[in-house]
């Protein structure tokens, strides 16, 4: 079985490293970064099946873009509408908005290292999800 691949969008360097290390240790995942919505969309459109999961920061470190807006854009794109997504945010209201838009239950950065978060990520990466 190949290693799961995750696209991590909008994180600062420190948070990307922390998330990537957690995913590598808990899920044996390869994690790539995208700094902007444009970069994420270009990456995903170049090979829609390349990533098993996309993590989206609530507010992007560079440029302050809205992660919820990216989730809306992905859900509206017929070629990317089924890509598994999670919002990275400590705010319950933002998590609920992401769920309402069709994202999987996400997690906050403060939840890294938590066994529940690890299991949530393993479940997302092991599901076929139809994508």
Image (cartoon, rainbow, N blue to C red):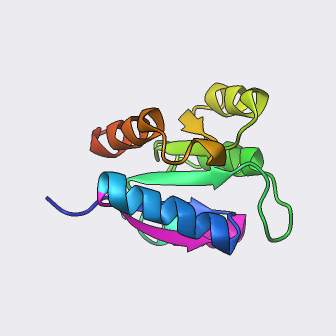
The reply, left or right, for residue 7 in relation to residue 14 is left
x%, y% of residue 121? Answer: 41, 43
Give whichever of 102, 78 is nearer the camera.
102
- Quarter-wise, where is residue 90 in the image? top right
**Quadrant occupied by the N terminus:** bottom left
Q: Quadrant of residue 48?
A: bottom left
Residue drawn 59% across and 49% down? 77
**Magenta part of the protein: which range?**
28-42
Q: Position of residue 62 (x, y in %)?
A: 80, 71
- Does residue 74 lie above or below 99 as drawn? below
Position in image of residue 22 (x %, y %): 45, 57
Residue 11 is at least partly visible in this image: yes
Residue at image position (51%, 53%) is: 54
Left or right: 63 as drawn, with respect to 98: right
Q: Is residue 74 left or right of residue 128?
A: right
Q: Position of residue 38 (x, y in %)?
A: 69, 69
Question: Extreme left residue here?
Answer: 1
Task: Verify whether residue 30 appears in magenta.
Answer: yes
Pick the front one: 61 or 43: 61
**Quadrant where the C terminus is found in the figure:** top left
| Residue depicted at 29% across the width and 38% down the height | 127
Q: Is residue 49 above or below residue 117?
A: below
**116 falls in the magenta region:** no
Q: Nearer the viewer, residue 16 or 94?
A: 16
Residue at image coords 56%, 43%: 86
Q: Tell whether 3 sits left or right of 14.
A: left
């Amino acid at each position: 079985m190949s290693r799961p691949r995750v696209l991590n969008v909008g994180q600062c360097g420190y948070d990307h490293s922390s998330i990537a290390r957690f995913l590598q240790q808990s899920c044996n995942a390869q994690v790539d970064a995208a700094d902007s919505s444009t970069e994420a969309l270009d990456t995903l459109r170049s090979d829609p099946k390349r990533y098993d999961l996309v993590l989206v920061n609530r507010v992007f470190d560079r440029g302050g873009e809205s992660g919820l807006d990216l989730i809306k854009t992905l859900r509206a794109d017929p070629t990317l509408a089924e890509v598994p997504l999670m919002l990275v945010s400590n705010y319950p209201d933002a998590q609920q908005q992401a769920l309402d838009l069709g994202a999987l239950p996400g997690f906050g950065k403060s939840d890294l290292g938590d066994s529940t978060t690890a299991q949530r990520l393993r479940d997302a990466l092991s599901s076929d999800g139809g994508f």
